[in-house]
Image (cartoon, rainbow, N blue to C red):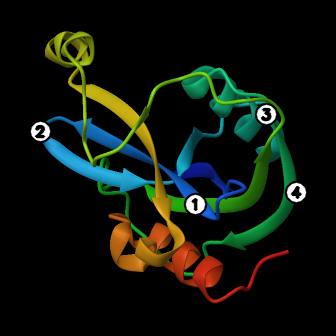
Amino acid sequence: MFNIRVYGILINDNNEVLVSDELIKGNHYTKFCGGGLQIGEGTINCLVREFKEEMNLEIEVISHLYTTDFYQKSIFNPNHQLISIYYLVKAMEPISVPIRQNPFEFDEEQMRLYEKTKQIESFRFVKWSDFSAEAMTLPIDKIAAKMVKAGKVG
């Protein structure tokens, strides 16, 4: 079974990279924003939908960056092969959701939600000087981060 994920890499005017800090079933993940492709949906439509759902943010997809080119087993479902597709995106409006300063900075409301759903996320920008593959948790995100940091974009 294949699990197709689509992620957007957003770099703001201050040369900072947007990341999502997620707490899922007791585990912490820092990853790029995005999510799962749904039946009947194209990859760009998926990414636009994910940013709207997660951040209430309209984005424009600028260019394709990378698609997984090796076997990656899903850490969430070992019976699935993961295929991740990364695009460079830009915000088409100001970001309205809270932007946190520290990794895994969740407020009380989010923690109450976590007790019910076992999954929450917060967003923050990472300064270019602090951004690297090591800043990301997931293996394919690390590859995309290396490409971005090396300037292999567009």
Check if mark 4's residue and mark 1's residue have beta carbons within 8 Å.
no
Q: Nearer the viewer, mark 3 or mark 4?
A: 4
Q: Residue 118 appears at what percent x and percent y? A: 20, 24
Q: Which residue is mark 2?
A: 26
Residue at figure coordinates x 46%, y 26% from the top left: 98
Q: Residue 45 appears at what percent x and percent y? A: 81, 35
* Residue 31 left/right relative to 79: right
Check if mark 3's residue and mark 4's residue have beta carbons within 8 Å.
no
Alpha-carbon distance for marks 1 and 3? Answer: 30 Å
Q: Which residue is mark 4?
A: 62
Alpha-carbon distance for marks 3 and 4? Answer: 18 Å
* Residue 119 left/right relative to 49: left
Q: Residue 116 appears at what percent x and percent y? A: 19, 10
Q: Earlier in the sequence, mark 3 or mark 4?
A: 3
Q: Which residue is mark 1?
A: 16
Residue at figure coordinates x 31%, y 27% from the top left: 120
Q: Earlier in the sequence, mark 4 or mark 1?
A: 1
Label 3 residue SS:
loop
Which amino acid type is marked by label 3?
Glu
Q: Residue 84 appears at what percent x and percent y? A: 59, 60
